[in-house]
Image: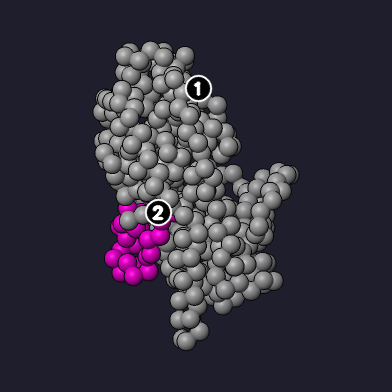
Amino acid sequence: MAVHQLACALHRQGCEVHVLYSKEPGEKLAPEVPYQIHWTRRFNVATVNLDIFSFAWSLNRLMRRERFDVVHGNAEESFFASWLCRKFNAIAFFTSHAPYVPPTGILRGMLHPISFLKQVNPYLLRSAASRAKKIITFSQFSRDRVLAGLGNRWQDRIEVISAGIDPSWFAIERQPSERPALVFWGRMEEEKGIPELLQALQIVGKKIPNVLLTLVGEGNRLEEFKQKVRKLGLIPKVVMPGWRSMEYIQGLAATARLGVFPSRIESFGLSVAEAMGAGLPVIATHAGALPEIMQDGVTGTLVSPQDAEALAEAILNALQDAEKSRLMAEKGRETARQNFSWDKTAQHLIVLYQKELQVAKNS
């Protein structure tokens, strides 16, 4: 979604934008977008992202025809992008979202084969980032993660530019339900804090029996979390519809009393930014980049990560003092309007693109 939003913003700024996406063989996708989409094959392999080869092959063919000025990658799929940029006289940019970047390269990593095989993709990502002219991160936290992996000599190559959210979030008209409804949207993974959210809900449910939590998302732990819901006796209090459209989620954001995002780590926190943009009162954690986008006690509430009791207490306090929650949410919405704009992100990127192109022209 971030790639799509940024591509649209770059297009609005007058750039000619091409985006390379992957899909399964036979998968029929024909979205209407203002930029040009090119498809390549997706390979589903758990241990290593073989899309690095299909992307390289497609990008090579595309660059031969289009002659781009800049190629901007955002994952290990762009492993070969810098080589292709040298071949076709383009500038390689890379956006890192990773919460972990290995401290050594692939060759040294292979000296420890067991740990290397468990995390091949982060090594591929590290290699792609290290060869880019500029590395973009959406937060200072993410910048620090990159420097921890690559070393301080890369600090001049890293630029922190905030991500944006879709403008439609700001148009949501809040109509909170009478029922104490909570909502979360994101990946169904442990790092999103779902286990402690369910434990917190069990505590809250003892004091507010009609509390309802909707968990929107897919992920590797979805079935495990469904079992945990049953084990904790929370079936009447939890709805898990899988992943749904942005419009569906925005409908929940309009009527829920609270958005709860107890992540253990975040490189930005897109769901939190979206919830703030919707004017939804937010509870999140002092984890990763979240304190960079939300101020505790001012634009929302932050609790310690992996602390179910603290999370439950914050939920109870927010539900019991709806006016305080509303006032913080209003400030959060204004903060989101000022800080989370894809157009501003695109404008900042274009300045960097032009600067690097001028350097290359003069060298």
Find the magenta span and give its range. Answer: 141-163
Residue 309 x, y percent position in the rendering: 26, 25
User: How far apart are the two marked residues, 1 and 2, measured between alpha carbons?
Assistant: 32 Å
Residue at 56 percent of width and 65 percent of height: 13
Residue at 47 percent of width and 26 percent of height: 214
Q: Is residue 40 above or below residue 85?
A: above
> Is residue 158 shown left or right of residue 31?
left
Q: Is residue 213 visible?
A: no
Q: Which mark is residue 339?
A: 2
- Give the amino acid at mark 1: Val
Q: Is residue 320 above or below residue 31?
A: above
Q: Could you say which is closer to the camera, residue 109 or residue 345?
A: 345
**Is residue 109 a member of the stretch shown in magenta?**
no
Q: Which mark is residue 106?
A: none
Q: Is residue 225 above or below residue 230?
A: below
Residue 350 x, y percent position in the rendering: 50, 69
- Give the amino acid at mark 2: Asn
Point out the frontmost of discs 1 and 2: 2
- Within the image, what quadrant is residue 317 found in? top left
Residue that label 1 marks:
239
Q: Are marks 1 and 2 in contact (CB under 8 Å)?
A: no
N-term mark: 1 or 2: 1
Q: Is residue 171 visible?
A: yes
